[in-house]
Amino acid sequence: MRDALFAKIQAQYDADPAPPPVLTLDEYFTGNTDESSIAPNQAGYGRPPLAELYARFKAIQQKRNVQAVLVGIHGDWTESHKYPHRWPPAENVHIYTTASREEVESWIAGLEADGAIEGWPYGMHPFAPQLNPGFQVFSVCWD
């Protein structure tokens, strides 16, 4: 499973190396036991465990005003591939929604995130789904 995940990331990187690759929630969290793979500076310091992060983002994804939730991959993913126990690191989580920033930030309360910013901090990867009319993207970021 891990090798298939890295192959998918590599294919996206090969297609366009500038914007970070993206994965669905299921692709990123299924089989992931590496607590340091997302928000490592907050792991053990208030950030919920991976299983809870996954459940929270899955609940957000089920909201009527949410089109998609994607995980943006950190640029250091190539380094983690060298270590069999490491999962590709995440940089942020992107939420496609018609909700306001305030509403999105209420959804992520307690995740020890630095907030939700409007847009793609490092650009939208061409493999990411297009936004439906009336939707915008908010990126959940951690230090």
Image (cartoon, grey):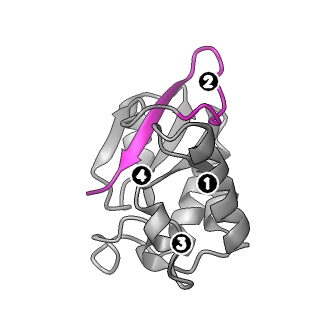
Disc 2 marks which residue?
A: 131
Q: Residue at coordinates 58% horizontally, 15% vertically from top-left? A: 134
Q: Please state the horizontal and vertical placement of residue 74, each as a whole percent of the image.
A: 43, 55
- The extreme front residue here reads 14
Quadrant containing the N terminus is: bottom right
| Marked residue nearer the N-terminal end (3 or 1) | 1
Quadrant assignment for the C terminus: bottom left
Mark 2 vs mark 1: give the one in front. Answer: 1
**Distance Cα–Cα, label 2 vs label 4:** 21 Å
Residue underneath mark 1: 9
Which is more toward the observer, 43 or 36? 36
Asked if 61 appears above or below 65 in the picture, the reply is below
Q: Which residue is mark 4?
A: 108
Is residue 19 shown above or below 76?
above
Q: Residue furthest bottom?
A: 85
**Helix, strand or loop at mark 3:** loop
Specify whether 11 is left or right of 33: right
Q: Which numbered circle lies on residue 81? A: 3
Q: Residues within 10 Å of mark 3 (few under 14, many from 20)?
A: some
Q: In terms of secondary structure, where does tag 1 sit? A: helix
Q: Dot 4: within a 10 Å radius of its alpha carbon, few (fewer than 14), some, or many (20 or more) residues?
A: some
Question: Can you see residue 139?
Answer: yes
Q: Is the residue 10 above or below the residue 50 in the image?
A: above
Nearer the viewer's eye, disc 3 or disc 4? Answer: 3
